[in-house]
Amino acid sequence: MPDDGDTPAGAAAESRAELDRLVGEIRTGLGAAHAAREVALPACRRAIRSSGSSIRAVHRLDPGRAAQLADEAEVALREAQIAVAGFPAVAQAGFLHDAEKEYAEARLTASLVAGDPPCGPVELGVDPASWMRGLAEAASELRRHVLDRLRDGDLEQGERLLDRMDDVYDALVVVDVPDALTGGLRRTLDALRAVLERTRGDVTTTVLQVRLQRALEAR
């Protein structure tokens, strides 16, 4: 008597069972990936919100609050990173890199304003491309700080901050690789260059005005 698998009906049944098994495995994997995304996405949103608030605290000259908010951003970011660790497609979807970039920007803005050495991507626990974009945007954030210092009459600090903006641009502009590998660093640097030139013009104008005023007062 022939085995069921040797008959057309038996072969069809085996084929259907194999299809069901394969699709079932895929469904299980997709379900796990979806669950990871549902954890990571709100965590990334929290990290981005806390990072933005941290940068605003830096501009308000409240480094303690800025550090606290950056710590909160880090906790949320680590939650997201852990959630998607086994799901590369989810990790590469974009929202995690955005959160890493914003977190790096918060930490690096504080470092640049304080004049401290910047933390690298390994120390911050972020992707190198996210770190570079965060550094470039942190340098752009310095424009607001420069203008605030100029309004306060602290020209020396304004000039120091401008020098740091220059340093960041000079360090990053040599990264000559396709944007697909850097997450669009070239566009971010183009924006930084425009911000840098406007800031340099503002600093130069203010310095010349102050010098002229002092010269007139010395007569």
Image (cartoon, rainbow, N blue to C red):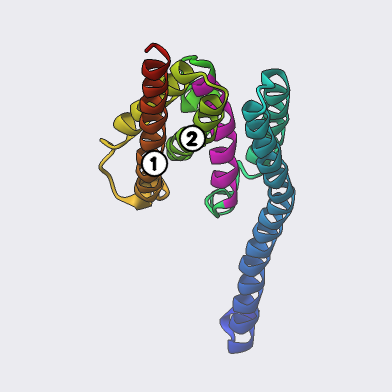
* Location of mark 2 (residue): 143
* Location of mark 1 (residue): 198
Number of numbered discs: 2
**Local SS, label 1:** helix
Quadrant of image for the N terminus: bottom right
Q: Are marks 2 and 1 in contact (CB under 8 Å)?
A: yes
Precedes in sequence: disc 2 or disc 1? 2
Q: Which of the two residues, 195 or 125, is positioned nearer the viewer here?
A: 195
- In terms of image quadrants, where is residue 61? top right
Residue 55 appears at what percent x and percent y?
62, 33
User: The residue under label 2 is which amino acid type?
Assistant: Arg
**Local SS, label 2:** helix
Q: Residue at x 51, y 26 (%)?
A: 150
Q: Residue furthest front?
A: 219
- Identify whether 69 is placed above or below 186: above
Assess disc 2: are there few (<14), some (14-19) or many (≥20) residues with their C-alpha within 10 Å of its C-alpha. many
Relative placement, left or right, of 160 versus 29 is left
98 is within the stretch colored magenta: yes
User: The residue under label 1 is which amino acid type?
Assistant: Arg
Q: CA distance from mark 2 to mark 1?
A: 9 Å
Residue 182 appears at what percent x and percent y?
38, 45
159 is within the stretch colored magenta: no
- Identify whether 129 is placed above or below 114: below
Q: Which secondary structure dominates the residues rendered in magenta?
A: helix
- Identify whether 19 is placed above or below 40: below
Stretch of the chain drawn in magenta: 95-113
Relative placement, left or right, of 113 versus 24 is left
Looking at the image, can residue 77 be seen?
Answer: no
Assess disc 1: are there few (<14), some (14-19) or many (≥20) residues with their C-alpha within 10 Å of its C-alpha. few
